[in-house]
Image: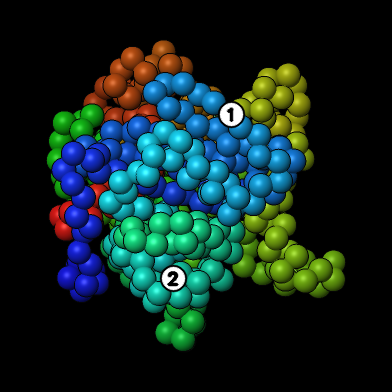
Amino acid sequence: MTRDSQCFSPPAFPDRLPRMILVINSGSSSIKFALYESPNQKLTLGGIAESLHTPQSVLKHRFHQIDETTPLPHADHQTALEQIITLLRSKFGEPALTGIGHRVVHGGDFFGKPTLIGKQVVQKIETLCELAPLHNPANLLGIRAMQTLFPGVPQFAVFDTAFHQTMPPKAFRYAVPEAFYRDHGVRRYGAHGTSHEFVANRAAEILERPLAELQLITVHLGNGCSACAIRDGRSADTTMGFTPQEGMMMGTRSGDVDPTLHHYLATKTGESLEAITQKLTRESGLLGVSELTNDCRELELRANAGHEKARFALELFCYRAAKHVLGMAAALSRLDALVFTGGIGENSPFIRRTIVGHLAMLGLNLVPAANESNGQHTNGQISTGDGPSVLVVKTDEELAIARQTADLVSGGQ
Ligand code: ADP
């Protein structure tokens, strides 16, 4: 969508004022925020309001390398966002915002690129809530609150699904009756696109080759987990599907299960389909299998201390992740690099080592010391030899959203 098609003109600010881009990533229980000096995207203030709706709600922020935490017991999204804006104003007065970028998880097939938010866009995001019930409603809360607080500032939605709009039909269609697709939009959309695209670009920089010439598999392992096959700089396939529930085992999400499971469990237990979906979404994955926690770091500690279910949850997580990585290889003709990112992918040598251990046929050759230090001293490279590179790349979805927002503000799309 071009700037003109949205009748949008960037606001005129006096040159002496810093031009700032605010990024809001409003999730179900947390809100990440970051303020960038545009156009060079220098981070000036950032943080997170987390554990919302609980007595432990807090606002953490970093300003000039100094971290501060403010308790916000029982804060909801609106309260947390107001606190974030109060914080902003305490540091910058009335910040000269040229644009606000919002992360939106599900854009269906309506949105193939970042989009200026108007009434119709909000309505579309609303209708897509049924495809991402954990995420889109929270994203909308952030959008609405910011529209109220900054009515004159243009706001943009950056969609997690947009990067995957380049998938060919053989990757995005399911083998179900055509009418499901035609009448109900039942197809694979993918998610985490902003992260996959960001780390792919960074991988190209590390490898000193144009992204358009590379064939990559990027593996985002955080609370949500997905892999993406990237060919010619575009998403060729990904593991999340109609919703961000498909694919890999995740923190609390099951990932792939047999399609008849809902019917079987509903018949067996008398539970509603909704209750079963809830269990597969919020009570499965690492949490469900370990019966302990969805926190991977904690599970590693417990597994090392002899906790069998923690050990098994991690074993299952890695094996299933490796199967999905190999599935992505079907979309490529060769592999130049396997790229790990996300909280787990960036920080867990054990998880990377175990997944790579299941991928012997890809000819990956990990360097143990580089893997142990998360590639910190080797520019992200943790492999050697003639085979595909293995990289650890820190994702930065907020920076990616800021860059895309700045592009739209300046009309440089
Ligand atoms: P989100 O998807 O919510 O953005 P993150 O990408 O921050 O989540 O990932 C959170 C996950 O990363 C948690 O399971 C956490 O335990 C895991 N993690 C963070 N640091 C480590 C570490 N050093 N070792 C293992 N897991 C880690």
Task: Please state the horizontal and vertical placement of residue 33, each as a whole percent of the image.
Answer: 45, 42
- The answer to which quarter of the image holds residue 147 is bottom left
Task: Please state the horizontal and vertical placement of residue 96, each as a whole percent of the image.
Answer: 30, 46
Which image quadrant: the C terminus?
bottom left
Q: Is residue 115 visible?
A: yes
Q: Tell me if 12 is positioned left or right of 216 in this view.
A: left
Residue with the mark numbered 2:
122
Taking the spot 66% from the left edge, 34% from the top edge, the residue there is: 71
- The answer to which quarter of the image holds residue 331 is bottom left
- The answer to which quarter of the image holds residue 103 is bottom left
| In the image, residue 65 above or below residue 173 | above
Q: What element carries label 1?
A: strand
Which image quadrant: the N terminus?
bottom left
Numbered disc in front, either 2 or 1: 1
Q: Residues within 10 Å of mark 2 (few under 14, many from 20)?
A: some
Q: Which of marks 2 and 1 is nearer the N terminus?
A: 1
Amino acid at circle 2: Val
Q: Tell me if 148 is positioned left or right of 393 in this view.
A: right
Q: Is residue 399 visible?
A: no
Task: Please state the horizontal and vertical placement of residue 170, each as a whole percent of the image.
Answer: 35, 68
Task: Please state the horizontal and vertical placement of residue 296, each as a whole percent of the image.
Answer: 61, 33
Taking the spot 55% from the left edge, 43% from the top edge, the residue there is: 83
Residue with the mark numbered 1:
69
Q: How crowded is mark 1: few (under 14 residues within 10 Å), some or many (20 or more)?
A: few
